[in-house]
Image (spheres, coloured by chain):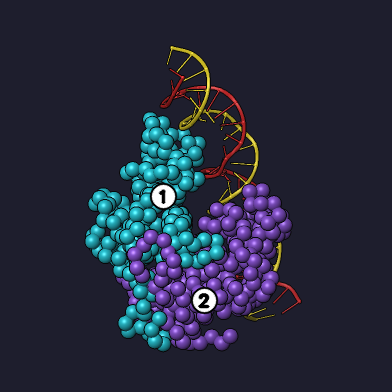
Chain colours: A cyan, B purple, C yellow, D red
Amino acid sequence: MTMSAEETTPNDSPAPGLRELKKQMTRDGIAAAAFQLTLEKGLDHVTIEEISRIAIVSPRTFSNYFSSKEEAVVSAGAQEPEQFVPTFREALQEAPPLQALREVFSDFFMNRTDEQLDHIREMLALVEQYPSLLDVQTARFGNIEAELRAVVAEHTGTDAETDMYPWLVASAGVAGIKAALRVWGSADDGRDRLVKLVHEALNLFSEGLPVPAGAGGGAGRA
Amino acid sequence: MTMSAEETTPNDSPAPGLRELKKQMTRDGIAAAAFQLTLEKGLDHVTIEEISRIAIVSPRTFSNYFSSKEEAVVSAGAQEPEQFVPTFREALQEAPPLQALREVFSDFFMNRTDEQLDHIREMLALVEQYPSLLDVQTARFGNIEAELRAVVAEHTGTDAETDMYPWLVASAGVAGIKAALRVWGSADDGRDRLVKLVHEALNLFSEGLPVPAGAGGGAGRA
DNA sequence: TGAAATTTTTCCGATAGGGCAAACTCACCG
DNA sequence: CGGTGAGTTTGCCCTATCGGAAAAATTTCA
């Protein structure tokens, strides 16, 4: 993971000292506690106080890391939005944006451990059960989308303020994952199926979302 | 407004009696107060108590209508997600889904009054300024998306649980509007420009989001 | 090791979220 | 018309949350 010349952002991981490590562990511990408790007792019966007790921090510290229990739950085991940026940049060297996204995301799911996939499944179930979690998760996806959008804008030399292209591509990418995850989550399939769905979704975008065969009332093709 | 045979949903507007009218006025009044106060003092200096005072209701009543001040602000002058359903259904008789959406939304913006467009502009600015408002607005768009998705599923005879198509089309539609609104909002153009952007956005989806001319590093076409 | 920087905690007041029952308003029927 | 019941609004109140401020604890570094 070599670091090229300069970073636009100063890159806030200057040194993984003991301090940063502990912070990350604290954060993860809180998120894990929140997630676990929610699985066990249901979101409404979980309080910040109890999460904090289990994570062995004060409630005030909870607030230093998360702004609500929902955020903590959804953060459990989740990727930081910036994680996808370097990979996406590389992929853009090889393929146009939509296909690059397809590779980035299918690789991502390909590389999850079985445990991580199980976790994703559980998270999907929770998110479907509690609208407030869905809102937070949607916001997280929105952050990923923003990162991707910036990369697309930078790559194609378009300005995200005046050109819709970066918006459209980034949202297509994220929408593709979301659709794939939903459909995958409601069946009982494995990793391969998920990767296949991701491919399929982003390919459909590349093809202009052709109307599926045997559609109801409409006119001709898209 | 004749009511045909049966409605799947009991249709909760059985009679626009005085009762419903007052409720709607109360709701609108609260939302308007929240919106206005936020414009004037900034979101963080607005409390539910003050909103309630201006809307002449008790704080308790505020909670009966909205679950947070953010919700109230974003609700101001907004459409109910279901509003688009009947129009979309009709449009689907004439054109394939993506084009139908294009017509629905461009007609929608075409039919706004100048005041409504101004309001939309102010709302866009607020949403850009306060992330918490963006979250709520994103959730609103999500509701619209869900309605559209259901219509698409019903129309194309696909099952939203096992088929990604409804997810992809609905999210493309909503993403198109969002992109159009953003780009429109950052310039100082009129209604025509917005309608044009909506057309453009959804057409790009129909065409598979072709890479714009003169793109940076990637390979060939999408 | 000792001082500086950072994080965690304690203390605590301001708000928010709702359950509950009383007061009130509207719709409808003799 | 006046009564009555369904539907709304309000007051009361208790619990949970949001964060500011400063003390206490921990890590870093010269």
Classify residue D10 by image quadrant.
bottom right
Residue A118 visible, this angle: no
Classify residue B163 by image quadrant.
bottom left
Residue placed under numbered mark 2 in the picture: B199
The kind of residue on which mark 1 rests is Glu
Q: For the C terminus of chain A, which image quadrant?
A: bottom left
Q: Chain of mark 2?
A: B
At which x and y percent is residue A162? Answer: 55, 64
Q: Residue at x 50, y 66 (%)?
A: A164
Specify few, some or many for label 2: CA neighbours under 10 Å numbering under 14, 14-19, or 20 or more: many
Residue placed under numbered mark 1 in the picture: A82
The kind of residue on which mark 2 rests is His
Q: Chain of mark 1?
A: A
Q: Residue at x 53, y 73 (%)?
A: B198
Q: Residue at x 34, y 68 (%)?
A: B220
At which x and y percent is residue A98? Answer: 37, 65
